[in-house]
Amino acid sequence: MVAPEIAIVDSNTLSCLGLQNLLEEIIPMAVIRVFSSFEELVDDTPDMYAHYFISAQIYFEHTAFFLPRKPKTIVLANGDNQPQLAGIPTLNIYQDEKALIKSILQLHQFGHKGGHPHSVTEHPGGHSCGNPYADHDLSPREIEVLVLITKGLINKEIADKLNISLTTVISHRKNITEKLGIKSVAGLTIYAVMHGYVEADRI
């Protein structure tokens, strides 16, 4: 199956780029396309997208287009100015990175309770694979270290909590990042939530 494509439609370039970078980290197999106007989206192939992240203004101006696509639409809200929309999820893009990741993960969990529609991707070699991280089994100790990393603990605190040496913690972290191919704490947090090691509302 082809990689899911996600459209971000917002005239605010900085918001678009920030959200695009986060989504690429959270859903590495997805293709994220950015449009500065509704007209640009319509000039493309608008119905090929798995999700639309739409600014509130563009949503209200083109409700006739988005209402039939309600399950795929997420309205971008600005801070305290949150629109109240029946059955349409909103995402406050004026939060810090950690809170924004948490919100996106909660939307993902809510929207895909029955499983992700694009859980199998076809690779150029012809073989298919489900989860991009499926081949990277972490040991029970590595999972413990991963969970503590997502809670914001530094290496020394992890060593104290697990009664292991600092060198061992560093070794576990190195193994985790090599197995998963993820270096950032945000990326590791996303992996931990997606695999059920921590709940999105606990980070």
Image: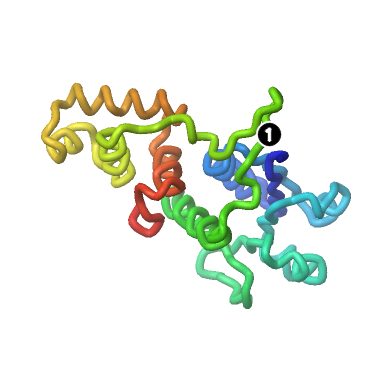
Residue in front for this viewpoint, 98 or 95:
98
Number of residue marks: 1
Residue in front for this viewpoint, 115 or 19:
115
The residue positioned 25% from the left and 34% from the top of the image is: 141
Q: Quadrant of residue 55?
A: bottom right
Residue where numbered disc 1 is placed: 122
Looking at the image, can residue 172 be seen? yes
Q: Quadrant of residue 74?
A: bottom right
Instruction: Decide: is 48 above or below 3.
Output: below
The residue positioned 57% from the left and 61% from the top of the image is: 111
Instruction: Decide: is 127 above or below 117.
Output: above
Q: Is residue 97 left or right of residue 3?
A: left
Residue 134 coordinates in the image, percent (x, y): 49, 35
Instruction: Decide: is 46 above or below 30.
Output: below
Looking at the image, can residue 91 be seen? no
Per the image, label 1 sits on a secondary structure element best described as strand
Instruction: Decide: is 188 above or below 77.
Output: above
Q: Residues within 10 Å of mark 1 (few under 14, many from 20)?
A: few
Residue 23 coordinates in the image, percent (x, y): 57, 45
Q: Is residue 169 left or right of residue 35?
A: left
The residue positioned 69% from the left and 40% from the top of the image is: 3
Is the N terminus in the top left, top right, bottom left or bottom right quadrant? top right
Q: How is the image coloured?
A: rainbow
Q: Is residue 27 left or right of residue 142?
A: right
Q: Amino acid at mark 1?
A: Glu
Residue 180 coordinates in the image, percent (x, y): 44, 30
